[in-house]
């Protein structure tokens, strides 16, 4: 199979929506919110939004942000979403997306790449990441 990794575009929205619904097990993706947010994500210069195609169909994506920091002595890339279509898992596509993100991060001068996750620790450890922090969250009151 021929796979291509590239920057996400507006026309990828239907495929990304399909993949998001596989990814978000702790959240309930909302189509109206997605339609409002997606165009901004592909147009934000601080985001890194990559997709991987298989035979002209997007079968995975990675979304991250370059964050300026004081504590790390430079910018940090935070990978916040990574998903590969269930039917395409096990082909190394997630690793290819992360490898591309790492290349972009180092090119942009990032000093580290971080991933907040609790379900994919083994995947990231297998790529050379080390566990370093616990994340806390607070949802906006209703």
Image (tube, helix red, strand yellow):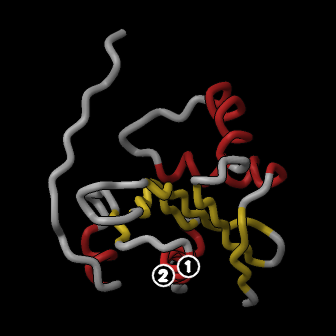
Residue situated furthest bottom in the rendering:
1
- Residue appearing at x 37%, y 73% in the figure: 111
Q: In this view, does 72 lie to the left or right of 84?
A: left
Query: Alpha-carbon neighbours of circle 2 within 10 Å: few (<14), some, or many (≥20)?
Result: some
Q: Write the residue at 34% across / 19% down.
A: 140
Which of marks 2 and 1 precedes in the sequence? 2
Locate the N terminus by quadrant.
Answer: bottom right
- Write down the residue under mark 1: 107
Tag nearer the camera, 1 or 2: 1
* Quadrant, the C terminus: top left
**How many numbered callouts?**
2
Percent x, y for residue 94? 50, 75
Quarter occupied by residue 121: bottom left
Q: Looking at the rendered structure, which numbered label has been put on residue 95? A: 2
- Which x, y percent locates residue 2? 75, 89
Q: 91 left or right of 37?
A: left
Q: In the image shown, does 60 or 141 lie closer to the viewer? A: 141
* In the depicted structure, whether residue 57 falls above or below residue 5: above
Q: Position of residue 5 (x, y in %)?
A: 69, 77
């Amino acid at each position: 199979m021929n796979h291509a990794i590239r920057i996400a575009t507006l026309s990828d929205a239907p495929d990304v929506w399909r993949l998001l619904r596989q990814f978000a097990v702790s959240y309930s993706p909302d189509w109206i919110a997605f339609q409002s947010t997606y165009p901004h994500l592909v147009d934000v210069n601080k985001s890194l939004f990559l997709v991987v195609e298989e035979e002209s169909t997007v079968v995975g994506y990675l979304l991250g942000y370059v964050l300026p920091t004081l504590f790390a002595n430079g910018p940090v890339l935070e990978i916040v979403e990574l998903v590969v279509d269930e039917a395409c898992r096990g082909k190394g596509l997630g690793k290819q997306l992360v490898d591309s993100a790492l290349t972009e991060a180092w090119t942009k001068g990032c000093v580290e790449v971080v991933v907040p996750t609790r379900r994919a620790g083994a995947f990231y450890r297998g790529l050379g990441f080390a566990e370093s922090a616990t994340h806390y969250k607070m949802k906006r009151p209703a």
